[in-house]
């Protein structure tokens, strides 16, 4: 029994060390945006919140890259919120300004008080909002 406990503890330590190493050394650093400068639920700013390692975010990543290229004049702010504490503050603040007390998760788009969530909702609805923003300019 003691041998089994030693094996389990050793595995736990190895997994914990690997997790820390992944976060510190492998996870790409994502630039932070200061909450005071970035968080304003403006109808002309598109906040794209995502999580590094999120499978749903990975599903829409190519779509978001194409959208960014297709609408270069629209202010699309891409903010990673799983590992970046500053971006987590922006995430909470922008959602609060949109009237959402508990952010729904990622991927999420916030445009003013409009919120799109998920890898199904965002690709089907986002472009219409971006076209409306371009028309205002």
Image (cartoon, rainbow, N blue to C red):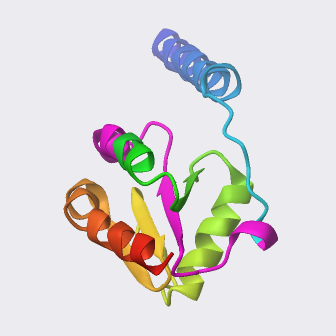
Residue 58: x and y in percent read 35, 38
Q: Is residue 41 above or below residue 2?
A: below
Q: Is residue 21 above or below residue 77?
A: above
Residue 101 as seen in the image, left or right of residue 61? right
> Would residue 22 be visible to someone looking at this image?
yes
Q: Of residues 105 and 40, which is closer to you in this image?
A: 40
Q: Is residue 59 above or below residue 78?
A: above
The residue under the point 50% across, 90% down is: 99
Residue 57: x and y in percent read 37, 46
Q: Which residues are magenta?
A: 36-64
> Would residue 105 be visible to someone looking at this image?
no
Q: Is 59 contained in the magenta span?
A: yes
Residue 97 as seen in the image, left or right of residue 105? right
Residue 113 as seen in the image, left or right of residue 45? left
Write down the quadrant of residue 127 in the picture.
bottom left
Residue 16: x and y in percent read 60, 26
**Count of all numbered marks drawn on residues in the image:** 0
The residue under the point 79% across, 61% down is: 34
Residue 57 as seen in the image, left or right of residue 7? left
The residue under the point 50% across, 9% down is: 3
Q: Of residues 75 and 77, which is closer to you in this image?
A: 75
Q: Is 133 contained in the magenta span?
A: no
The residue under the point 50% across, 82% down is: 112
Q: Quick one: which residue is furthest to the bottom in this view?
A: 99
Write down the quadrant of residue 33 in the picture.
bottom right
Q: Report the quarter where the N terminus lies.
A: top left
Residue 84: x and y in percent read 68, 49
């Amino acid at each position: 029994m003691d041998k089994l406990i030693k094996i389990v503890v050793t595995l736990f330590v190895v997994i914990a060390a690997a997790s820390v190493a992944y976060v510190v050394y492998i996870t790409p650093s994502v630039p932070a945006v200061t909450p005071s400068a970035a968080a304003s639920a403006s109808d002309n700013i598109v906040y794209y919140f995502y999580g590094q390692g999120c499978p749903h975010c990975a599903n829409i990543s190519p779509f978001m890259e194409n959208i960014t290229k297709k609408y270069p004049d629209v202010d699309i702010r891409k903010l990673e919120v799983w590992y970046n504490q500053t971006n987590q503050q922006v995430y909470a603040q922008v959602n609060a300004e949109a009237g959402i007390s508990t952010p729904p998760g990622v991927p999420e788009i916030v445009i003013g008080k409009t919120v799109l969530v998920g890898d199904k909702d965002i690709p089907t609805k986002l472009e219409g909002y971006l076209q409306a923003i371009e028309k205002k300019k």
